[in-house]
């Protein structure tokens, strides 16, 4: 811009150059965050000074397979670590993101107790919460495999007695008490009279 001053037939000029105010700093609301897979967090960037000519912020992730970022919204994708970078002008700020496994909060069974005769089976179903737990694998055990066995939730009665069937996911467990009763016809062969029968 040129400024001109005139007096009579005399003039004087001054050339003015307006220099844009550069970005002096950028800060984030968080320096670090811990997320479970599927969770998200929003980062806000503050660019200074207030009269900086271009306060546009660009976002990037050091590993988008672990955590990606869009307009400051960070989404956890898989277990690991990633650094989220915000840049304005030639200034940058970072936030360290740790993506951890979502622990199992509880496990429940469809039955808390059951009565079976020798040779019978019952199927137990386990529900693991929360639904987004990283590892919802259920392991099954019996307190006495000679009385009743369990495989993938299917309990098979072997002989008279009482056992506890345990389902475990993560650090959480659920139990079902199973009573195995004798088979009234155990050892009976077809054609033989039943004592007390009519």
Image (cartoon, rainbow, N blue to C red):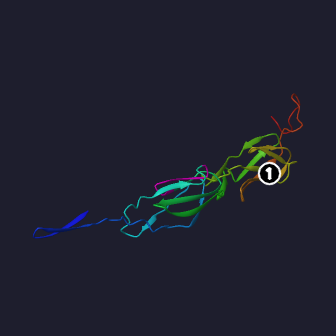
Q: Is residue 188 left or right of residue 177?
A: right
Q: Quadrant of residue 192?
A: top right
Work out whether residue 126 or residue 131 is closer to the camera in this orientation and state it.
131
Residue at x 82%, y 39% (from the top left corner): 119
Work out whether residue 79 or residue 129 is closer to the camera in this orientation and state it.
79
Tell me the magenta residue range. 65-73
Residue 183, position as x, y percentages in the image: 83, 42
Residue 128, position as x, y percentages in the image: 65, 52
Q: Is residue 35 left or right of residue 4?
A: right
Q: How many marks?
A: 1
Residue at x 84%, y 39% (from the top left corner): 196
Q: Is residue 34 magenta?
A: no
Residue picked out by circle 1: 141
Q: Is residue 65 left or right of residue 13?
A: right
Residue at x 39%, y 60% (from the top left corner): 54
Residue 66, position as x, y percentages in the image: 61, 52
């Amino acid at each position: 811009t040129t400024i001109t001053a005139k007096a009579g037939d005399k003039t004087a000029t001054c050339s003015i150059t307006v220099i844009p105010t550069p970005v002096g700093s950028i800060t984030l609301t968080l320096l670090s965050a811990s997320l479970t897979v599927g969770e998200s967090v929003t980062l806000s960037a503050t660019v200074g000074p207030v009269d900086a000519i271009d306060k546009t912020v660009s976002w990037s992730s050091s590993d988008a397979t672990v955590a990606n970022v869009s307009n400051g919204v960070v989404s956890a994708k898989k277990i690991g670590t990633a650094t989220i970078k915000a840049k304005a002008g030639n200034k940058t700020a970072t936030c360290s993101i740790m993506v951890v496994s979502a622990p199992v909060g509880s496990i429940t069974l469809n039955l808390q107790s059951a009565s079976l005769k020798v040779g019978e089976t019952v199927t137990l179903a386990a529900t693991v919460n929360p639904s987004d737990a990283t590892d919802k694998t259920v392991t099954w055990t019996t307190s006495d495999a000679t009385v009743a066995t369990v495989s993938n939730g299917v309990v098979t009665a072997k002989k008279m007695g009482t056992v506890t069937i345990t389902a475990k996911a993560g650090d959480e467990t659920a139990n079902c008490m199973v009573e195995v009763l004798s088979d009234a016809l155990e050892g009976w062969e077809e054609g033989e009279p039943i004592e007390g029968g009519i």
